[in-house]
Image (cartoon, rainbow, N blue to C red):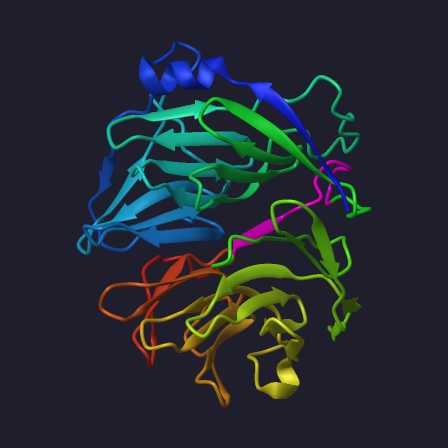
C-alpha cells in the first residue's frame, strides 16, 4: 500500500521560531483566577498534561488553564480574547507547548504564545462541509525523530520545523466531517510504527515508515450502532497497544485484538474516549464514567460526577487522577471520590 507526500514550505513558521513575526498574535501574561475553584462554565475538558514543575495544564472549550496546586491561571490573547476550543495539547522535546484548537494552532515557547495556521496545498480538495470551515486540529504527536504529526480537518501533516508535509492515506476511504480528514487520533509505538484511527473508517491503520496496513476489528455494540473503528490510545508497560471507541476498548498484543465492553465491566454504556496507564501499571479508561483495570477485572466509578462523560485523564505525581469531563469541568480522583474543581452544576 502506498501513501503520498506533498511538501509545503513554511518559511513564516521558521521566522516566528527564530525572530518573531507580525502575522502572529502574541498573548498577554497569564491572568490569575484568585479562587481555587473555577466559577465559570469551561465546557469540555479535552486534554491535559503535567510539566516538570508539577503544574497541570488543561485545554478546554472555553479557555486554556494552568493549575499550580493553589490556583488556576488562564492564558489570554493580547487583545483579551480567550484560547477557546482546545482539542489537544503536546509538549515537545524542546519544552514548547503546542495547542491544537478548532481554529488552528497556538505555540507557547515559555514566554509568549504565537498563533498560526498550517499552510494548505493548493491542490487540496475543497472542504464542502459548510458547518466546519475552520482549521480544526484533532490531535498531535511528536515522533522519535522529532517530527510533529498533526491530524486536522484539512488532512494529516508532518512538520519538521521547516515544512509541513501532507501525508495521504489512500487506504482510508472516508473522511470525518471533511473528505480530507482521514485521521483523528494517532500513536507511535516503541518500534516506531505510527497508528491512525478515525470514526468513519473500518479498523485501524499502522504505518511502518514504508507501507500502511489496515487492521479490521470485530465491532463493539452500542445502542445506536456497531462500532468497528477505533482510536489508538497508548502502549502499556507490557507492550500491549490499547484502542477505544464508543462501544468499548481493544488490547492488541502484536497478534490479536481482544475487545472489552460493558459486559466485561466497563462503566456505563462501555463508551471509552481516553486510556492511560499509571505508575503501578493499572489501566484507567474514561468515557461513560471512569473504569480501572488491574489486569483481571474492571472496577467502575461514576458517583460524584455531574456529567459522567470523560474526555481526558492524567495521573499527577502524587498518583491521583485528574479527570476532564464533558460540559462539567475537571475533577481530581483520589482513588475513592471525585473532587470537583469547577463549580458548574448544570
Magenta-drawn segment: 176-188
Q: Main secondary structure of the magenta part?
A: loop
Asked whether, in this view, residue 35 is left or right of residue 133, the answer is left
The front one of 153 and 205 is 205
Residue 14 on the magenta segment:
no
Q: Quadrant of residue 154?
A: top right
* Location of residue 75 in the rendering, given as x and y in whole percent from the top left corner: 32, 35
Asked whether residue 117 is in view, the answer is: no
x, y percent for residue 316: 28, 63
What residue is rendered at 26% in x and 50% in y? Answer: 51
- Report the residue that reaches farthest toward the front: 210
Please, is residue 196 above or below residue 32 in the view?
A: below
Residue 110 visible in the picture = yes
In the rendered image, residue 180 lying in the magenta stretch gets the answer: yes
Q: Residue furthest top?
A: 22
Q: Nearer the viewer, residue 118 or 115?
A: 118
Residue drawn 68% across the image and 71% down it = 247
* Whole-percent x, y for residue 45 in the image: 45, 53
Q: Nearer the viewer, residue 304 or 28?
A: 28
Q: Nearer the viewer, residue 227 or 329?
A: 227
Residue 319 vs residue 115: left or right? left
Q: Is residue 102 above or below residue 48?
A: above
Amino acid at each position: 500500500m502506498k501513501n503520498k507526500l506533498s511538501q509545503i514550505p513554511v518559511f513564516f513558521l521558521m521566522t516566528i521560531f527564530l525572530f518573531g513575526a507580525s502575522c502572529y498574535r502574541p498573548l498577554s501574561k497569564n491572568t490569575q483566577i484568585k479562587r481555587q475553584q473555577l466559577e465559570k462554565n469551561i465546557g469540555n475538558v479535552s486534554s491535559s498534561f503535567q510539566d516538570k514543575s508539577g503544574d497541570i495544564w488543561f485545554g478546554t472549550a472555553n479557555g486554556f488553564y494552568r493549575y499550580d496546586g493553589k490556583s488556576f491561571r488562564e492564558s489570554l490573547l493580547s487583545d483579551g480574547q480567550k484560547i477557546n476550543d482546545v482539542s489537544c495539547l503536546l509538549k515537545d522535546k524542546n519544552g514548547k507547548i503546542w495547542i491544537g484548537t478548532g481554529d488552528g494552532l497556538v505555540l507557547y515557547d515559555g514566554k509568549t504564545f504565537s498563533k498560526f495556521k498550517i499552510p494548505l496545498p493548493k491542490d487540496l480538495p475543497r472542504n464542502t462541509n459548510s458547518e466546519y470551515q475552520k482549521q480544526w486540529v484533532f490531535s498531535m504527536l511528536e515522533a522519535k525523530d522529532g517530527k510533529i504529526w498533526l491530524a486536522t480537518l484539512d488532512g494529516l501533516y508532518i512538520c519538521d520545523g521547516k515544512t509541513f508535509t501532507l501525508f495521504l492515506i489512500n487506504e482510508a476511504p472516508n473522511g470525518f466531517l471533511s473528505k480530507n480528514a482521514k485521521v483523528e487520533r494517532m500513536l507511535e509505538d516503541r518500534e516506531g510504527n505510527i497508528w491512525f484511527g478515525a470514526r468513519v473508517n473500518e479498523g485501524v491503520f499502522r504505518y511502518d515508515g514504508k507501507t500502511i496496513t489496515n487492521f479490521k476489528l470485530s465491532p463493539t455494540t452500542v445502542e445506536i450502532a456497531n462500532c468497528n473503528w477505533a482510536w489508538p490510545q497508548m502502549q502499556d508497560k507490557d507492550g500491549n497497544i490499547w484502542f477505544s471507541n464508543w462501544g468499548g476498548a481493544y488490547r492488541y498484543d502484536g497478534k490479536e485484538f481482544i475487545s472489552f465492553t460493558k459486559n466485561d465491566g466497563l462503566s456505563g454504556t462501555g463508551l471509552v474516549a481516553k486510556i492511560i496507564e499509571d505508575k503501578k501499571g493499572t489501566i484507567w479508561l474514561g468515557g461513560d464514567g471512569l473504569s480501572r483495570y488491574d489486569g483481571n477485572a474492571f472496577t467502575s466509578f461514576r458517583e460524584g460526577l455531574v456529567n459522567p462523560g470523560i474526555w481526558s485523564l492524567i495521573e499527577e505525581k502524587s498518583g491521583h487522577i485528574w479527570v476532564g469531563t464533558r460540559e462539567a469541568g475537571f475533577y481530581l480522583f483520589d482513588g475513592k471520590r471525585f473532587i470537583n474543581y469547577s463549580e458548574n452544576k448544570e
